[in-house]
Amino acid sequence: MTKAGPQALFALVESFFTKYLPRQRGASPHTVRAYRDALKLLLAFVAERRGCEIANLQLEHLNADVVAGFLDHIEAERSNSATTRNCRRAAIRGFFKHLVRNDLDHALQYTRVLALPAKKARQRPATYLEAADLRAVIANPDRRTANGWRDYTLLLFLYNSGARVSEAIGTRWTDLQLTSPRQVRLRGKGRKERMLPIWRETADALHRLRGNEPRCGRAARLRQS
């Protein structure tokens, strides 16, 4: 049971971001920022609608009608796409699930928010490059220079592994096995890890990049262990 007043709301906001997301769910910093931005927009919208400061908001002010109004607002007034609207809704749902677990007195109110449906978004056709086009992009850097070799290696690594940019940035030299069986450990969303094979071509490029580190500068280096 929670105490009434603004303190109750912001105590739950604090516990959501400092305890639940990082400790219980293991959310990545990117996920935490996305949830933070969505909740910040929602609270600002509710405060403006009620004509008060955010610091004066209470749990009872967060109901299904106001959340539905917020979702319509970001689409109509902020020109967000239906996909972005649904992403904001997903983040808000995560917070309201936290409220249900920690404030049973308002469980029905929160459940009605959780029942708000997602909006159907138009699926765009996937676009992609053919293998020949990708090879042309990878071959573009001037491999006669240290920086060119760095760029070539990064492009080749991304193509080979299918890693996200954030995963590539987070890769350490200790995550790489450059001799047979050649492979890399990637750390994805939610701190999930996966092992992927890498081509000999990629391993050779990475091996040379490591030898070129002093000339490539700090920006070229993979993270050290």
Image (tube, rainbow, N blue to C red):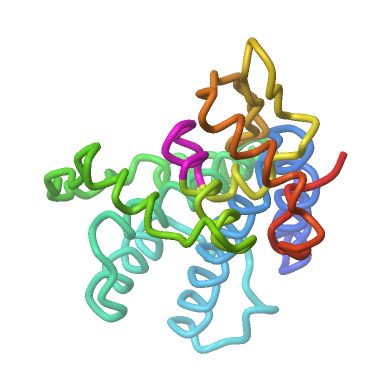
Residue drawn at x 67%, y 78% is 56
> In the figure, 65 relative to 134: above or below?
below
Residue at the extreme bottom: 51
First to last magenta residue range: 156-164
Residue drawn at x 62%, y 20% is 183
Residue drawn at x 70%, y 78% is 55
Q: Can you give x and y, in whole percent of width and height, for residue 209 in the image?
A: 68, 46
> In the figure, 53 relative to 117: above or below?
below
157 drawn magenta: yes
Nearer to the camera, 38 or 67: 38
Q: Can you give x and y, in whole percent of width and height, for residue 158 in the image?
A: 48, 41
Looking at the figure, which quarter contains the N terminus?
top right
User: To which quarter of the image does residue 197 belong?
Assistant: top right
149 drawn magenta: no
> In the figure, 196 relative to 149: above or below?
above
Residue at the extreme front: 144
Residue drawn at x 87%, y 39% is 225
User: To which quarter of the image does residue 80 belong?
Assistant: bottom left
Instruction: Answer left or right for 120 relative to 178.
Output: left
Instruction: Answer left or right for 127 relative to 17.
Output: left
| Number of callouts | 0
Main SS of the magenta part reads helix
Q: Can you give x and y, in whole percent of width and height, for residue 202 in the image?
A: 54, 33
